[in-house]
Image (cartoon, rainbow, N blue to C red):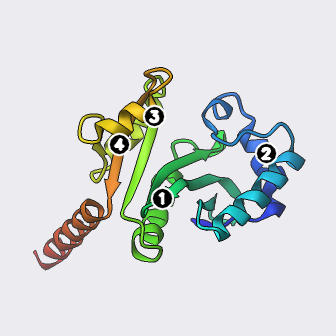
Amino acid sequence: MIKKRDVHESQALFDLMTHPEVYPYVRQKASSSEELMFMIKQMIEAEERGEVISRTIIDEWGNPAGTISLFDVQNNSGFLGTWLGKPYHGLGYNQSAKEAFFDELFYELGIENVYLRIRKTNLRSQKAAEKLPYVVSANETNQSLYEEINKDENVFNLYVISKDLYTLVHMRQHNEAEDALEA
């Protein structure tokens, strides 16, 4: 579902990124596949420095479908950024990619908190986030970070996924599945 970033995917990702329903929500916009290739190269270098963690979301045949990244990594926390190409909307790729990414972040890379900064006008992303049982609104519980991301204009809602809650939800789901098998 996800793999490490590769500059050779720039044309396919650029084609997906530039769709009018996708482009406004892409954090790192590029105006050409060459520019995107350069940005991917920079992102790979930033990952080596521990500043970002980024993966390409792939479909069943290994084709790029979008990207998922943890930006501004500090103190075992960072901000999630993800986008999917329009042909992949509504097919379950986003949730599967997030599960794989969170497993890697929390259990392999030592991340403790993943923050989501979602535009209040982006109802699609808000609904997707709120569907996940381990996502919690942090507008009030992390007031200083909420104010920081909205310092210029109040346009974002803040959510958090903690390693502890993510783990608890998955343990509970695993136990429910075992109980259903025994019944």
Residue 14's disc is: 2
Point 30% across, 62% down: residue: 166
Residue 159's disc is: 4
Q: How far apart are marks 2 and 3 (CA)?
A: 27 Å
Which amino acid type is marked by label 1?
Gln
Question: Where on the picture, by quarter, is residue 141?
Answer: top left
Q: Where is residue 2 in the image (x, y as percent from the top left)?
A: 59, 65
Q: Position of residue 37 (x, y in %)?
A: 83, 54
Q: How far apart are marks 2 and 4 (CA)?
A: 28 Å
Furthest residue to the right? 34
Secondary structure under tag 2 reads: helix
Q: Nearer the viewer, mark 2 or mark 1?
A: 1
Secondary structure under tag 4 reads: strand
Q: Nearer the viewer, mark 4 or mark 3?
A: 3
Residue 149's disc is: 3
Q: How far apart are marks 2 and 1 (CA)?
A: 28 Å
N-terminal of the pair, mark 2 or mark 3, is: 2
Q: Which of 60 and 115 is in front in this view?
A: 115
